[in-house]
Image (cartoon, rainbow, N blue to C red):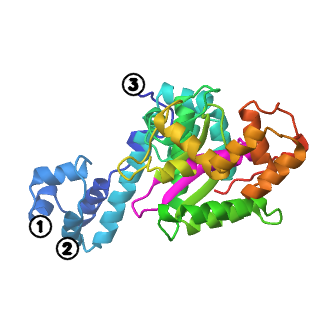
């Protein structure tokens, strides 16, 4: 049930028909006489005057002939009235649930959006709700829970998902995707070249890593964005296939360790390569332990390090610094890729060779 709010009274929103009534008085005409002039019934004209019927473009032209006032004047009058009426109805559609979502569930998200758009934090709950509706382009914040049920995102098992934060995050990704496109389409036959190029970027310390990755993925038909993560949206990535054959890939900035970032990047690339996301199945929710997740993990493992070479390396079990560095070099990757995998597989203790590991400092690309 919508709450009533204190604001402009609907009695102060003047229907355009009142202007017709004023002109009738000025021209000393009756409603019946005007109805005859424009070829409408007195009942129809009465409804237009009291605001229960709109002034259509066709009727606006008839009024132009009757009063000598341009049809554009009447069309604009009706449009302004519609806008004022919509604003009133919109403000009065705010529910207690929406206010709670804006002030509690989306408090951090709202603060971020307001700051990013240069807005001051809305002190009034009504204003916050309306601003969030416009920024996220949803008719109600309650609808975000439905948006959260969609999306090709990888759920982190360590955190609890808030359906409204998750929906807002997915909606933000969708809107980011609308802002920019790539010229090429993704061709899975070129995956080898893309993998080689990614490894070269990884090993080139002089490059602007973030910009280089975005430009490279664009060449291969993937729009890559790095965005902020929020408590309540425990995701690592989002993928969408566009109608033109290109893809949108979004990664959160939560993973600063380089080995985790690269694994996540290759994991998401695996979803694209494996065909997990299609135009008809734009957003897919993968559960822990699913076939798709396991396949994407395997893709990341096998394309970061050659499976046969890694198996031989582990058989020797010489995990000294020099051996790790040499093996990483043979695979065209940085040592932290090898160290990170060995640690995940419990072949090395966490904390070993920390001086060879790297933490990235990211900035948003959207």
- Residue 245 image position (x, y, % from top left): 42, 62
* Classed neighbour count for the residue bearing mark 3: other residues with Cα under 10 Å, few (<14), some (14–19), many (≥20): few
Q: Earlier in the sequence, mark 2 or mark 3?
A: 3
Q: Which segment is the magenta one?
A: 241-268
Measured in 3D between alpha carbons, the distance from the residue under mark 1 to the one under mark 3, in whole angstroms, is: 45 Å
Quadrant location of the N terminus in the rendered image: top left
Q: Nearer the viewer, mark 1 or mark 3?
A: 3
Q: Is residue 253 visible?
A: no
| Residue underneath mark 1 | 37
State yes or no: discs 1 and 3 in contact (Cβ < 8 Å): no
Q: Is residue 207 left or right of residue 266?
A: right
Residue beneath the point at 47% across and 32% down? 145
Q: Earlier in the sequence, mark 1 or mark 2?
A: 1
Q: Nearer the viewer, mark 2 or mark 3?
A: 3
Q: Is residue 180 left or right of residue 34?
A: right
Q: Is residue 48 above or below residue 185?
A: above
**Magenta-span inclusion, residue 224:** no
Q: Which mark is residue 65?
A: 2
Q: Earlier in the sequence, mark 1 or mark 3?
A: 3
- Residue 206 image position (x, y, % from top left): 83, 66
State yes or no: discs 1 and 2 in contact (Cβ < 8 Å): yes
Measured in 3D between alpha carbons, the distance from the residue under mark 1 to the one under mark 2, in whole angstroms, is: 9 Å
Q: Which mark is residue 70?
A: none
Determine the secondary structure under disc 2: helix
Q: Which mark is residue 1?
A: 3
**Magenta-span inclusion, residue 257:** yes
């Amino acid at each position: 049930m919508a709450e009533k709010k204190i604001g402009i009274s609907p009695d102060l929103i003047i229907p355009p028909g009142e202007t017709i009534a004023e002109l009738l008085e000025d021209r000393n005409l009756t409603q019946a006489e005007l109805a005859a002039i424009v070829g409408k019934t007195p009942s129809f004209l009465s409804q237009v005057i009291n605001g229960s019927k709109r002034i259509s473009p066709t009727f606006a032209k008839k009024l132009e002939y009757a009063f000598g006032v341009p049809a554009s004047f009447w069309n604009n009058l009706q449009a302004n009235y519609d806008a004022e009426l919509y604003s009133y109805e919109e403000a009065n559609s705010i529910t207690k649930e929406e206010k709670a979502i804006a002030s509690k569930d989306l408090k951090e998200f709202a603060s971020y959006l307001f700051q990013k758009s240069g807005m001051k934090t809305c002190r009034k709950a009504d204003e916050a709700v309306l601003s969030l509706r416009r920024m996220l382009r949803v008719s109600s914040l309650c609808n975000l829970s439905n948006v959260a049920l969609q999306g090709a995102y990888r759920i982190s098992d360590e955190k609890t998902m808030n359906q409204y934060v998750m929906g807002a995050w997915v909606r933000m990704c969708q809107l980011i995707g609308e802002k920019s496109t790539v010229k090429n389409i993704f061709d899975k036959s070129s995956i080898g070249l893309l993998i080689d190029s990614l490894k070269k970027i990884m090993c080139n310390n002089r490059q602007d890593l973030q910009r280089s990755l975005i430009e490279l993925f664009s060449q291969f038909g993937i729009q890559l964005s790095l965005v902020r993560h929020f408590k309540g949206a425990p995701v690592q990535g989002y993928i969408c296939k566009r109608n033109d054959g290109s893809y949108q890939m979004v990664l959160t900035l939560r993973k600063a360790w380089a080995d985790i970032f690269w694994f996540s990047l290759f994991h998401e690339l695996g979803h694209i390569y494996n065909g997990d996301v299609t135009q008809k199945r734009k957003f897919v929710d993968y559960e822990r332990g699913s076939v798709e997740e396991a396949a994407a993990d395997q893709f990341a493992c096998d394309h970061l390090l050659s499976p046969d070479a890694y198996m031989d390396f582990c058989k020797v079990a010489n995990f000294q610094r020099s051996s790790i560095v040499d093996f990483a070099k043979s695979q065209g990757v940085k040592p932290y890729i090898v160290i990170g995998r060995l640690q995940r597989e419990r072949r090395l203790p966490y904390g070993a060779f920390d001086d060879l590991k790297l933490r990235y400092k990211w900035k948003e690309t959207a």
